[in-house]
Image (cartoon, rainbow, N blue to C red):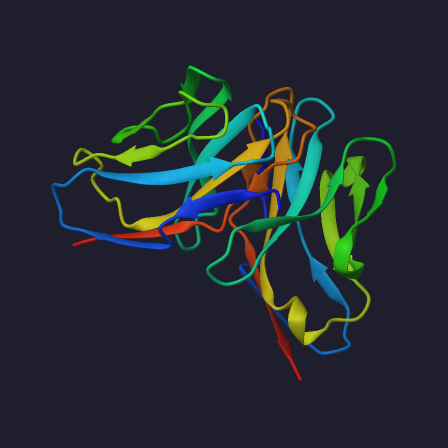
Amino acid sequence: AQSVTQLGSHVSVSEGALVLLRCNYSSSVPPYLFWYVQYPNQGLQLLLKYTSAATLVKGINGFEAEFKKSETSFHLTKPSAHMRDAAEYFCAVSENTDKLIFGTGTRLQVFP
Amino acid sequence: DGGITQSPKYLFRKEGQNVTLSCEQNLNHDAMYWYRQDPGQGLRLIYYSQIVNDFQKGDIAEGYSVSREKKESFPLTVTSAQKNPTAFYLCASSIFPGEDYEQYFGPGTRLTVT
């Protein structure tokens, strides 16, 4: 069965520092992977998705993620954090179905 | 302006009452979904619909019901049988059902039952 693990429910960085949010998946076949962002009391917005076209996926707002099959990982990174990046981030996986399985989320705090 | 509308944003009900949450989309998407979000638990799928007049249970369907009479509408009823209904509810849609189609989310409805 497919599943997603997000290590670290809270991550804090200083403005301008590297952002690294971790996501590991479990899947028996090549999965489709997604990163979503949620600002307080709002819905989710797609940051980027992996659909096997390229292992390094660039998304909106300067975020990118790299699919590493050997590590079953799809970590989200941004070279330089901005205050407006403070939000909750969700990794999700889909495998041969039309259902998404979400991780439990990582709340990113950005300090000035 | 295309998108997903959920109303109301905040909803308060007394225990034992049924309540219906609205979800409307004008994206012409075939598939629609309802999720429940609780702190620290991510999103859990309640029900989903791939086509009008058809829907399937998700992982936590007990105590909920849905209908899909129109392509653009997918209301969710939280019944009195749902033991812990207080949560943030999110509606989503995708152009087609399928593992590679992204889901678009509405702004959510926060339901509080006392």
Q: Nearer the viewer, residue A59 or A77?
A: A59
Q: Nearer the viewer, residue A38 or B21?
A: B21
The reply to whether residue A13 is in sight is: no
Residue at the image position 60 percent from the left and 21 percent from the top: A97
**x%, y% of residue B83?**
20, 40
Q: Nearer the viewer, residue B51 or A110?
A: B51
**x%, y% of residue B36?**
40, 42
**x%, y% of residue B108?**
44, 49
Q: Say how many tags the image has.
A: 0
Q: Residue furthest bottom?
A: A112
Residue at the image position 14 percent from the left and 41 percent from the top: B17
Q: Quadrant of residue A25?
A: top right
Residue at the image position 59 percent from the left and 40 percent from the top: B104
The reply to whether residue B12 is in sight is: yes
- What is the quadrant of the C terminus of chain B in the image? bottom left
Q: Residue furthest top?
A: B53
Residue at the image position 37 percent from the left and 33 percent from the top: B75
Q: Is residue B55 above or below residue B74?
A: above
- Say whether residue B94 is left or right of residue B91: right
Q: Quadrant of residue B2?
A: top right
- Say whether residue A111 is left or right of residue A69: left
Q: Is residue B27 above or below residue B6?
A: above
**x%, y% of residue A77?**
76, 58
